[in-house]
Image (cartoon, rainbow, N blue to C red):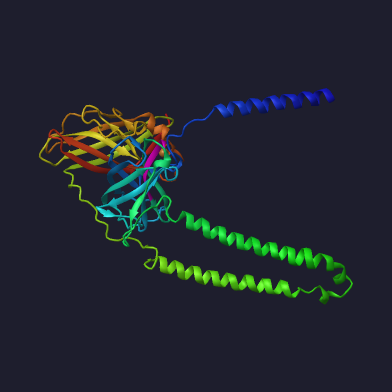
Amino acid sequence: MKLIKDRIAKWSMVGLLATFAATSFYAPSASAHGEKSQAAFMRMRTIHWYDLNWSKEKVKVNEEVEITGKFHVFEGWPETVAEPDTAFLNVGIPGPVFIRKASYIGGQLVPRSVRLEIGKTYDFKVVLKARRPGDWHVHTMMNVEGGGPIIGPGKWITIEGSMSEFKNPVTTLTGQTVDLETYNEGNTYFWHGASGSAIGMCLGWWYWGTVVRRFLPRLPDGRSGSCERADFGGVTKKVAMGFAAATILIVIFAMSSANSKYPITIPLQAGTLRGIQPIEEPKATVAVKVNDASYRVPGRAMRMKLTITNNGDKPVRLGEFYTASVRFLDADVYKDTTGYPEDLLADDGLEVSDNSPIQPGETRTVEVTASDAAWEVYRLSDIIYDPDSRFAGLLFFFDDQGGRQIVQIDAPLIPSFM
Ligand SMILES: [Cu+2]
């Protein structure tokens, strides 16, 4: 019996060590940060990010990166996400590895929440200043009050240098230039230190004066009924009063000296910004009807049957289908030059049964297949678990002169198992 117990103990220990060794060597780097686990239909049917551009992929500490692009607030906004009446243009990074110098929607600075309108398209710009060296996956994202984070495509950006070089100067309306990285730090430490030591002194005095000197030696008196003798002595009371008076005096004095050192101060600026200007994308002269759409389970592709009518005056071809940050391109028609994140770009992931130019006035029904590992990696295939099997996306048509038309599509997406 003893032998068996020993063996179990020994092998358990070996097992534990093996597990520990195995897990400590397994450290995968996450390449998406939150969006994968969100419901696929929500990612497809909330905000469509496109025309994204990153000014740099590698920067030094203190250098700036500009992320620009457009986003479309989808008409068929899901019920379970509150409408973006109060939304905030954010960046998805692991803490302030960059700081946000500025962000704009429709040319307006948006340090506060904004009101977005469903169905509208906006352009945006985010200016980031590099702070902490490393490789960072930077997402543009929109926080919607009552809805949660809506995460845009993420791109790896490298910061080189040393964080100690980082500076964040800002000039106030009172004329001084301060570095926000360290501004007021000493003052904060001083006052917390001062109040901390005052509290310490009070507690020390209380402990010594009442517990050590007065209370414990007289505990037997109290037990024997002569409790009133264990009173606090005159000195104790005086010191207590002294502490109280000093505290009030220091607070008043410190407050008035802070007021005279900083005579001009304002309250926190807050409040949702209304009237953000959307942009008008030129009305598409291509009309698209989704006859049906399906995806294989398991699989890495979705297929749709589209009836495309070209009402314009130039022949057009389908170059791209975008859904949930993933871009499926037909390499014969369109090539990305923006350095779009590799894991989200299917450079030749779009296959159209007949992608010859659709002449003005022509109507054609085609089979379109969007396939790429991204469909599975980014768990769009997980729409099978969603309570609403509908997709939405953007189609980009190109004419022979480089003109572009954007058509939004939206339809049920039916799984096929056989
Ligand atoms: Cu990420």
Q: Quadrant of the C terminus?
A: top left
Looking at this rendering, what residue extends furthest in the left direction? Answer: 313
**Residue in view at x 74 percent, y 63 percent:** 208
Question: How far across and down, in percent of the image, does residue 412 sit?
Answer: 35, 42
What secondary structure do most residues of the magenta stretch adopt?
A: strand
Of 242 and 35, nearer the camera is 242
Q: Is residue 227 above or below residue 39?
A: below
> Is residue 389 at all visible to an observer of this figure?
no
> Is residue 103 at all visible to an observer of this figure?
yes
Q: Is residue 135 magenta?
A: yes
Q: Is residue 382 magenta?
A: no
Question: How far across and down, in percent of the image, does residue 169 sit?
Answer: 35, 51
Of 250 and 137, nearer the camera is 250
Question: Relative to residue 184, is residue 251 drawn left or right?
Answer: right
Q: Is residue 164 above or below residue 25?
A: below
Question: How far across and down, in percent of the image, does residue 90 sit?
Answer: 37, 49
Of 191 and 79, nearer the camera is 191
Question: How far across and down, in percent of the image, does residue 258 sit?
Answer: 45, 66
Question: Relative to residue 333, is residue 2 drawn left or right?
Answer: right
Question: Relative to residue 110, is residue 12 drawn left or right?
Answer: right
Q: Quadrant of residue 195?
A: bottom right
Of 409 and 404, nearer the camera is 404
Give the residues in magenta.
132-142
Looking at this rendering, what residue extends furthest in the right direction? Answer: 224
Q: Quadrant of ligand 1?
A: top left
Q: Quadrant of the N terminus?
A: top right
